[in-house]
Image (tube, helix red, strand yellow):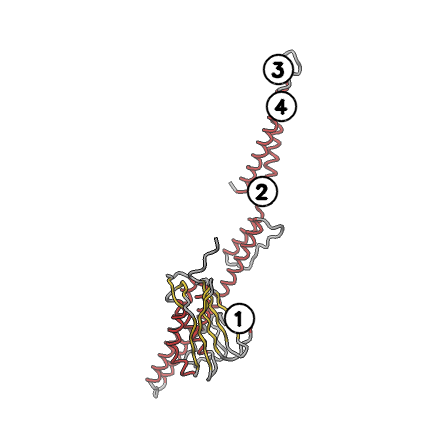
Amino acid sequence: MSTRLKLALSYAGVVVVSGVLLLAAVAAYLLRYVPDTVDVYPNRGDLIRAFVPVAAVVVVVLLALGLGGGWLLAGRMLAPLERIGDAARLAAQGSLSHRVALEGRRDEFRDLADVFDSMLEQLEAHVAEQQRFAANASHELRTPLAISQTLLEVARTDPDRDVEALILRLQEVNTRAIDLTEALLLLSRADRRAFPREIVDLSLLAEGAVEALVPLADRRGVAVEVGGVPAPVLGSPALLPQLVTNLVLNAIVHNQSSGGSVAVRTHTTPHAVALVVENTGEPLPAHRVATLVEPFQRGAERTRGDDHAGAGLGLAIVDRITQAHGGTLVLTPRTEGGLIVTVWLPHPYPPSPPA
């Protein structure tokens, strides 16, 4: 049986039982005042014979009214669920733009419809983001393959080709393709949020990342300093070093051509741990800063010939890793040019609430 029929039968059952109990109470109350003797008319037997057929008719009428009214009421009550079901069927067919948009007073069905609409909005945004990401990833992966193919075709038709230069160029293109593939895999791993967690000190990770990237900073004329307090967090020992390295690398690469600086520091609060990476550079408008965490968004000063051009996944990876750890990424443009990137992560030992 359908839910509507079950509700209608339930309504009818309640109405009939209530009617029978009412009639029984009335009969019992009235009949006790009527004598049960044959020499009195009407006596109790006469009233019972007259009352029972009428009571049966009333019960049948109550049953019909209960079924009909219950069917109508159940239909009105279940109408919001039908609209939500229609929206779910459309979503299952791939149409995520449809909304329930249930009107009327706020009740359980209205709350359910609003939650369902919110879910559809998030799914639509997520699917659109994944489609953009897939298109950009396909384009980025095709570029090194197309370059390799062009180099090989030119080398095949050029009798005076420089084999050593060709090998070096192919190795460079292949390295970029591998780096992009690894970045995509890392991004996917962060999205899944399926990784072991242990206590990791962000201040030690920051010192290690700066030490590893000092040669690159020296070549670019960028001064890097690191400081702060111990900053323990509960997270992935594989993903968090990548987060810190990406931040420091971006701060060095997206900097002034000479005389730039990068400051890396950590600090803690009772409930959160922060990693702050601040770098000099060109002034960034607010609308530009808002797009930097989107995949494949490169800085304005980056070129394909850059020795660390990458694929524009640095801050996107940082953002996904931060979200996977329950944290927040905050980008703030510096007034004099450059960017301040702050990663907030939950403190592994928050203070206990007062008793």
Mark in front: 2 vs 3: 3
Residue that carries the numbered disc 1 in the rendered image: 290
Residue that carries the numbered disc 4 in the rendered image: 29
Q: Secondary structure at mark 2?
A: helix
Mark in front: 2 vs 1: 1
Q: Earlier in the sequence, mark 2 or mark 4?
A: 4
In this view, the residue in front, 216 or 314, is: 216
Q: Earlier in the sequence, mark 3 or mark 1?
A: 3
Residue 185 visible? no
Residue that carries the numbered disc 3 in the rendered image: 36
Name the residue furthest bottom: 160
Name the residue furthest left: 164
Residue that carries the numbered disc 2 in the rendered image: 74
Q: CA distance from mark 2 to mark 4?
A: 35 Å
Q: Secondary structure at mark 1?
A: loop
Image quadrant where residue 100 sits: bottom right
Image quadrant where residue 32 sits: top right
Q: Earlier in the sequence, mark 2 or mark 1?
A: 2
Please report contact status of discs 2 and 3: CB closer than 8 Å, yes or no.
no
Q: CA distance from mark 2 to mark 3?
A: 46 Å
Name the residue furthest right: 41
Residue 215: % across, % down: 38, 80
Please report contact status of discs 2 and 1: CB closer than 8 Å, yes or no.
no
Mark 4 crowd level (few <14, some 14–19, many ≥20, 10 Å Cα): few
Mark 3 crowd level (few <14, some 14–19, many ≥20, 10 Å Cα): some
Mark 2 crowd level (few <14, some 14–19, many ≥20, 10 Å Cα): some
Q: Earlier in the sequence, mark 4 or mark 1?
A: 4
- Amino acid at pointer 2: Ala
- Amino acid at pointer 1: Ala
Residue 146: % across, % down: 41, 77
Please report contact status of discs 2 and 4: CB closer than 8 Å, yes or no.
no
